[in-house]
Image (tube, helix red, strand yellow):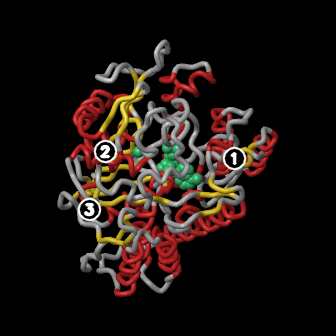
């Protein structure tokens, strides 16, 4: 990139409800923890918005020159059917209803989740921390805070939220407000107190349970994230992310545990919460409200693909809104994002064609390209203003009077930050075959290879016959599609 003076990166910290300059705990590094999925079910596209956001944040930190250390956890135990202490363990419940082990359920939905991430061009974290791998550390953490901050009931070990300063500041809630948190557990001292260890009820056995000083049982969900964050990133680390629902219960509880663990007081000091910044993406909603799994039917990325939308159209749809705004999903909106993505791809393909015809220039970037690069940097440095950044991408494509190499280099850099791959590998990414397909992928590929040979030999009669053969199998060939899909099932 260029040698222009570095712009400070400003991010919105939910804890202070203000824009703050990113100042890393460890110079040159950015350590980020993102609350990951509870793998008892598929993730819906609302959940995926949280990871597109975290990935765009990570890419921006890389763009700003920081060595990124990003962790996403996999919650495979401990998350109850309510965010507070009511209900069953989501994993155990799913296992019972599907007649599988909780471990099988976790493995299956983890793989599905990772595939969705790859379709959305979300980069892998440096490590996937799986909650069940950290149970001994969770017990140690809980032991270290138990005496001063917890009390034991028949059902488990509970954190007393009155023992830390500023409990609930992140949520702007007052301890004991009780709202939405009716005393579900007999003996809790405050409505907001939460379990950090849940004992297996006498006479029952859980699939996932461990011995602890408080009896056999399982860790609380909030404890998991405190422990995995501390274990992999140290405390304090730089940024903790999650969806805005986590601002209300999960993250305030993590913060309380972190304060207890570190013996820290008031949250007026940025580092006392365990992370310097807490960032939250707003919801993807549909006409009925927040997209959630409890309503039964929910939208998955696979369904978007089955309907012929490239998954990166969904990523673009997310980026068209600021991450702190609600985003309403509609098929029309997705269609518009897909059209925009295709236009960007066409522009990139046209630029590639021009470049192939000429000899590469080595002159420094012209002032106009530098200005566009600067504007892009300003947009992303302003709390990840992706809607603005996208318009700068389009202006760079459109600035035809400027050097094609310089435009191509700039747009390629912008694409890396946005995770939109305008030039490379787009075809390879989502070679997606809808689940309902009757014709196998191998069969499709074999016919397509023959068709390619026929077209190369200018034997268009054979090529058309092969196209008809595919059409009869429900496969539409998409020649020249800017996203590089060779085919899709016509359903
Ligand atoms: P879960 O698997 O329920 O723990 O959720 C995974 C992530 O998705 C969390 O960061 C949630 O806050 C986030 N999330 C849940 N629902 C939505 C939604 N409708 N829109 C955006 N993010 C969401
Ligand atoms: Zn978490």
Of mark 1 and mark 2, the one earlier in the sequence is 2
- On the rendered image, what quadrant is the N terminus found in? bottom left
Taking 482 as reference, is 124 above or below it?
above
Identify the residue under disc 2.
257
Dot 2: few (<14), some (14–19), or many (≥20) neighbours within 10 Å?
many
Per the image, the residue denoted by label 1 is 488
Q: Quadrant of residue 146?
A: top left
* Image quarter where ligand 2 lies: top left
Single out the mark in the foreground, 3 or 1: 3
316 above or below 469? below
- Where residue 261 appears, as percent x and y from the top left, is 24, 43
Which mark's residue is nearer the viewer, 1 or 2? 2
Provide the residue designation for mark 3: 270
CA separation, marks 3 and 1? Answer: 50 Å
Q: Residue at x 32, y 28 (%)?
A: 135
Label 3 with label 1: CB-CB less than 8 Å:
no
- For image coordinates 40% across by 23% down, the residue present is 217
Residue that appears at 30% across and 67% down: 64
- Pointer 3 or 1: first along the chain: 3
Spatial CA distance of label 3 from label 2 is 15 Å
Asked which quadrant contains residue 403, the reply is bottom left
SS of the residue under disc 3: helix
Expressed as whole percent of the image width and height from the top left, the position of residue 283 reads: 56, 58
Neighbourhood count class around disc 1 (C-alpha, 10 Å): few under 14, some 14–19, many 20 upward: many
The reply to whether residue 51 is visible in this rendering is no
Q: For ligand 1, tell me if the residue under mark 1 lies within 8 Å.
A: no
Instruction: Tell me the crowding category of disc 3: few under 14, some 14 to 19, or many 20 or more residues within 10 angstroms, Cα based.
Output: some
């Amino acid at each position: 990139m260029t040698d222009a003076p570095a712009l400070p990166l400003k991010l919105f910290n939910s804890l202070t409800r203000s824009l703050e300059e990113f100042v890393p705990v460890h110079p040159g590094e950015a350590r980020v923890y993102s609350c990951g999925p509870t793998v008892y079910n598929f993730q819906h596209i609302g959940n995926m918005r949280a990871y597109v956001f975290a990935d765009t944040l990570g890419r921006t930190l890389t763009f700003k020159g920081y060595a990124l250390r990003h962790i996403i956890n996999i919650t495979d135990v401990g998350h109850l059917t309510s965010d507070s202490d009511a209900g069953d363990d989501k994993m155990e419940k799913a296992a019972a209803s599907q007649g599988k082990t909780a471990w099988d359920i976790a493995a299956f939905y983890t793989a599905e989740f990772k595939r969705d991430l790859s379709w959305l061009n979300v980069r892998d974290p440096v490590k996937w921390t799986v909650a069940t791998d950290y149970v001994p550390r969770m017990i140690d953490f809980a032991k270290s805070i138990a005496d001063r901050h917890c009390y034991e009931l028949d059902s488990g070990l509970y954190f007393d939220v009155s023992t830390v300063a500023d409990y609930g500041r992140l949520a702007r809630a007052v301890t004991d407000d009780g709202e939405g948190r009716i005393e579900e557990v007999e003996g809790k001292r405050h409505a907001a107190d939460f379990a950090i260890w849940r004992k297996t009820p006498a006479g029952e056995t859980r699939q996932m349970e461990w011995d602890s000083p408080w009896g056999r049982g399982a860790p609380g969900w909030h404890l998991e994230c405190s422990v995995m964050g501390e274990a992999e990133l140290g405390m304090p680390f730089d940024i903790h992310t999650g969806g805005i629902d986590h601002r209300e219960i999960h993250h305030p509880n993590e913060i309380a545990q972190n304060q207890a663990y570190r013996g820290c007081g008031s949250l007026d000091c940025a580092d006392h919460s365990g992370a310097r910044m807490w960032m939250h993406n707003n919801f993807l909603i549909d006409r009925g409200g927040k997209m959630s799994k409890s309503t039964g039917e929910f939208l998955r990325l696979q369904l978007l693909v089955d309907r012929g939308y490239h998954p990166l159209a969904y990523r673009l749809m997310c980026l068209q809104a600021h991450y702190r705004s609600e985003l309403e999903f509609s098929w029309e909106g997705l269609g518009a994002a897909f059209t925009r993505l295709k236009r960007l791809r066409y522009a990139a393909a046209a630029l590639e064609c021009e470049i192939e015809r000429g000899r590469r220039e080595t002159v420094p970037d012209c002032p106009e390209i530098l200005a566009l690069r600067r504007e892009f940097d300003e947009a992303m440095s302003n709390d990840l203003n992706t809607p603005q950044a996208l318009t700068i991408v389009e202006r760079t494509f459109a600035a035809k009077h400027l050097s094609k190499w310089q435009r191509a280099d700039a747009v390629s850099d912008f694409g890396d930050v946005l995770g939109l791959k305008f030039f490379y590998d787009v075809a390879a990414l989502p070679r997606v075959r809808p689940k309902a397909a009757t014709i196998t992928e191998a069969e499709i590929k074999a016919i397509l290879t023959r068709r390619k040979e026929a077209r190369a030999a200018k034997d268009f009669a054979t090529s058309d016959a092969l196209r008809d053969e595919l059409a009869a199998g429900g496969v539409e060939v998409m020649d020249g599609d800017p996203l590089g899909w060779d085919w899709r099932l016509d359903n």
